[in-house]
Image (cartoon, rainbow, N blue to C red):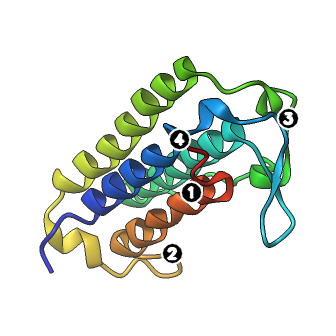
Amino acid sequence: MTENPGVLVEQAVERSLRLVATWPVWDGQPLTSDDGRTFTPHKAVRRIADHIIDHLAEVEALLAGVPTQLDEWHASALTSAADLAPFTVDDVREAEQRLRRLGRTLALRYAALDPAEWDKDRTPNWTLRQIADHLIEVEWYAQQVGDLS
């Protein structure tokens, strides 16, 4: 398969942003996912961005032949005071800009590579295609808040 796997991540970001666009009506009450984690619009946007950043850093480390940086933050286990802030139309626009740029940066990074690199064995790490396939799941964070229209 020669389609850039990063493009699929861009598409997942766009699907997420369709949900994000409905969030300015959020009532301020955190939502609980099936696994018991708490989500708010700000937290979902933060987690999408952080997840892409984490794996973009991993891709860069793998390509540079250096160890990946240890992930030492709380990820979705933490709900900060900032996550509880009202979510406005301006927050939607900011999320659109940030998340689209991140998705595009990942897709462009993959596009700059010889497609053979996407499936190169990088044991004990995932292949670059596997990383992109995993990143398609960022949409899950947006689904935890859902369509509030």
Say which residue label 2 marks.
125
Coordinates of residue 5 in the picture (x, y in percent): 27, 66
What amino acid type is highlighted by mark number 4? Answer: Val
The quadrant in which residue 120 appears is bottom left
Q: Is residue 53 left or right of residue 97?
A: right
Q: Residues within 10 Å of mark 2 (few under 14, many from 20)?
A: few
> Mark 2 and mark 1 in contact (Cβ < 8 Å)?
yes
Say which residue label 1 marks.
68
Which disc, if any, is residue 80? 3
Of tags 4 and 3, which is closer to the observer?
4
Work out whether residue 146 or residue 138 is closer to the camera in this orientation and state it.
146
Work out whether residue 81 or residue 132 is closer to the camera in this orientation and state it.
81
* Mark 2 → mark 3, Cα distance in angstroms: 31 Å
Q: Considering the image in quadrants, where does the N terminus appear?
A: bottom left
Callout 4 secondary element: helix
As drawn, the residue found furthest toward the front would be: 149
> Mark 2 and mark 4 in contact (Cβ < 8 Å)?
no
> Mark 3 and mark 2 in contact (Cβ < 8 Å)?
no
The mark nearer the N terminus, 1 or 3, is 1
* Mark 1 → mark 4, Cα distance in angstroms: 31 Å
What amino acid type is highlighted by mark number 1? Answer: Thr
* Mark 4 → mark 3, Cα distance in angstroms: 19 Å
Residue at position x 67%, y 58% in the image: 144
Which disc, if any, is residue 29? none
What amino acid type is highlighted by mark number 2? Answer: Asn
Q: Residues within 10 Å of mark 3 (few under 14, many from 20)?
A: few
What amino acid type is highlighted by mark number 3? Answer: Ser
> Mark 4 and mark 1 in contact (Cβ < 8 Å)?
no
The mark nearer the N terminus, 1 or 2, is 1
The mark nearer the N terminus, 4 or 3, is 4
Say which residue label 4 marks.
20
* Mark 1 → mark 3, Cα distance in angstroms: 26 Å
